Every structure is written in C-alpha cells, then in structure tokens.
Image (spheres, rainbow, N blue to C red):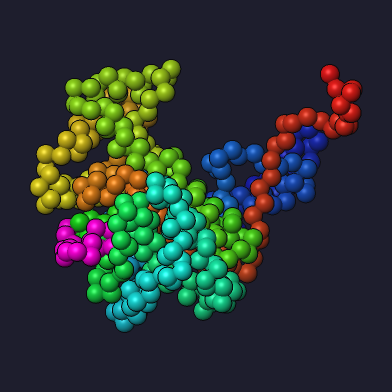
Amino acid sequence: MTDKKYELTNLSSGKKSILEARSGTLGPDVLNIANVTRDHGVFTFDPGFMATAACESKITYIDGDEGVLLYRGYPVEQLAEKSNFLEVAYLLINGQLPSAAQLAEFVHAIQYHTMINESLLRFFNGFQYNAHPMAMLSGVVASMAAFYHDSTDIHNPRHREIFAHRIIAKIPTIAAAAYKHSTGQPFMYPRNDHDYCANLLNMFFSVPCENYQVDPVAAQALDLLFILHADHEQNASTSTVRLAGSTGTNPYAAISAGISALWGPAHGGANEAVLAMLEQIGTAENIPKFVAKAKDKNDNFKLMGFGHRVYKNRDPRATIIRAMCHKVLAKLGKSDNPLFELALRLEEVALKDEYFIERKLYPNVDFYSGIIYSAIKIPQSMFTVMFAIARTVGWVAHWQEMISDPGMKIGRPRQLYAGPERRDYAEMSNRG
C-alpha cells in the first residue's frame, strides 16, 4: 500500500517529482522509482542490489539487524523445533501450515514420485566419473523439461503444482545418482517406506549386497539442515530463478539456473569453504596466527563462516545448528571430532576479539553445517548439492509466486555504461 510520499529534486534543472513509498507487513518502506527515468532521464545505481527491492513477496522475511528469519510469518526457531522439512515445504509453497489431511496428501505426492525416468538415469553415463556433482545436478535438472514437456504450461495452476511435487520429489534421487556415479557404485532406487531424508541417506549409502540401516539421528540432522536452508528471501540463486523464470522459460530451466548460481563459493559453496579453512588452520595452536591473517587487510586469508551479507547480528540458524552439531557428534561417537573442537575454539577466540565484535562478525549457518554433513559421511563435493536439495523448495515457492502474479514483467536491469564513445570502424591498414 502507499501511505508516504517523497519529493525528488534535480539540483541541476530544478525539476521536481513525487516518489510514492510502499509499506510492507514488516521491514523498511520501499520507494517506487519507476518514473524516475521518465521524469529525470536517469537510472538508479545500486551495485549488488544492496538497497533495491526487486519484487514484492509474501514468503520469507529477514531482519538482519535483529537476527530474525520468518517463513510465512513463522520464526524459523519454532519450525526447526516443532516441524519437519516436508511440512515446511508445504508452508512455503502454499502459504499456510497444512491440516493433517493436507500434509498426508502432500507427503504422499512427494514420496510416491521419487523415481526418475530410466532414460534420464542413463544420462549420468555421459559424465566423466570425476565430474563435479553440481554440474551433473544442473544438467540433469535442465534436461527434465525434455521428459515432462506435457505438463510445463506455466500458466496452468495444475501444471505448476505437478512441477512442484515432481522436482521436490526427484531432486534427491538425481543428487544420489550423481553421488553414486562419482563413486562407481550401483545406483540405488528410492524407497517409499522411508521419509524424505531417510530415503536420501539410503540412496546415498546403501548397496545391493547388504542391508543398510539409516541412523535416525543422521536423518533428523539432515531434516533440520533442510528446514534451515529451505529459503532465504531474495538471495543470489533465488533471484536467478526469478530472473530466468520471468522470461517464461520452463520451470526446470529456471531451477537449473538457480542450481548454477548456488554453486559459487560465496553462496552455496561456503560450508565447503569453512571445512577447507578449518583443515588449513589444523590445530588450536594455529588459531591466533590465522585470526591475525584475517584481520590483516593486506592478507587474502578470510575466516569463512563468519558474518553475513544480510545479518548484522547473529544468524539465527547458526545457533540451532550448533546445538544439533553437538547432538550428532555425541550420537555418532565423534564427540572428540577435531574439526568440531577446532571450530568451537575458533568461535570462542573470534567472538572475544574486538575486531570481530566491532564488525559484528558472528558465525553464520555455514560455519557448522559442513561439520554436520561431514559427521554423517556426506563428502565435501556433495555439500552444495545438499544445499540445493533444500533450497529447491524456496525456489519453487518464489517461482510460483512470480508466475501467478498478473503484473509479472520480464526482468531487465539497466547499467551505467563506461565504455568507449561512438567510433567508426577502421580498416586493417589504418589501425595504429
């Protein structure tokens, strides 16, 4: 809604125009700058979109100063304690917590559509054995449009629902196939008698020659991580899904674009970078040296897993994951895990250092998640894939919200051009 107006004055020409402010349910107002170019002949300039609201959304709210994360209005702490991943998926996609009957129907739609076409499965044979799993995941998800083109009418609400169920159900199967391909082990089919996370772990670690029992604590830890990674407002990968989807492309292509954006070490690959950093530090005795390196502006070393682009206080997800990290390591008999002990010591040292206190560089969600993945034997190369499985739910929710918006427009950012002025083509013989 509009309840405030601001006057913009061009100091060169003296021309004035009125900018209307729009107020959301929570958070700061936003200025409608749609007419600034028409009225003043200028674009706005905001590298990295630090102060730009690119869309209106009802899905997730973040207050970075207070360390607040809400899914459809529900604090993530409450959902982590009382809910489960598929219920959170229903909430994000549909806007409300489900009734018992609605949840049962949704879970059934996911659990009984986990198999992928055998022809799609054979795609993995075309990848090198040491191909990065994210490359395989992105490629195979994009190719799903070739198998399900009969239900990709983005303007058909039923087709959008089918797509949502299909991608959420099948992406763990695709991820597990990528893992099995990298290990040379036979692919394991999904099992409908397992819940979402237990099914994933079974496809990862079971083999045909013996029985495999999923550790319930490992499944619980994975479910928690998936809840905390399910959505995070207009981050880079979600914005990529929205931008790609705004062209009207099929939803599998949009999700594949999001997977590719997530692959970057500054985004989904950050938890892998945390583990690599801990291994580089090695022992607690080396922490002061590396903390000093992190504070040295002339040194390229960074403490990965500290601070966040949005959170200027504690990341609420990090506190939850820290407690689960203790539980997982204790249950799996790894309470003396050297990386976890090193992480705790690093956290303790950094949070007492004035440099980090002044800059509010607290541990974020990536600081502990990689340790949990490592404890339940997920290899580092698959860390970002696990993130993608969870974030697919958020991508689907945002894609559906955008596509169902009657005012949707194709995304088309503008630029500040700083290249050469107009010049004429010179023949080869006349070039200096």
Q: Position of residue 400 (x, y in %)?
A: 52, 67
Q: Please state which of residues 13 and 138 is positioned toward the viewer in this rendering.
A: 138
- Residue 355, located in which quarter of the rendered image? top left
Left or right: residue 12 versus residue 55 is right
Q: Position of residue 169 (x, y in %)?
A: 38, 69
Q: Which residue is painted at 89% across and 28% down in the image?
A: 427
The region drawn magenta spans 202-217
Quarter of the figure that contains the N terminus: bottom right
Q: Is residue 205 magenta?
A: yes
Quarter of the figure that contains the C terminus: top right
> Compared to 230, does 111 lie above or below?
below
Q: Main secondary structure of the magenta part?
A: loop
- Residue 108, located in which quarter of the rendered image? bottom left
Q: Please state which of residues 311 and 205 is positioned toward the viewer in this rendering.
A: 205
Q: Please state which of residues 180 and 68 is positioned toward the viewer in this rendering.
A: 180
Toward the bottom, the furthest residue is 101
> Compared to 334, does 125 lie above or below?
below
Q: Position of residue 385 (x, y in %)?
A: 38, 52
Q: Which residue is painted at 47% across and 56% down in the image?
A: 126
Q: Is residue 337 magenta?
A: no
Res 72 seen here: no
Q: How many marks?
A: 0
Q: Which residue is painted at 72% across and 51% down in the image?
A: 35
Res 201 seen here: yes
Left or right: residue 409 versus residue 288 is right
Q: Position of residue 87 (x, y in %)?
A: 32, 69
Left or right: residue 234 versus residue 100 is right
Left or right: residue 4 versus residue 68 is right
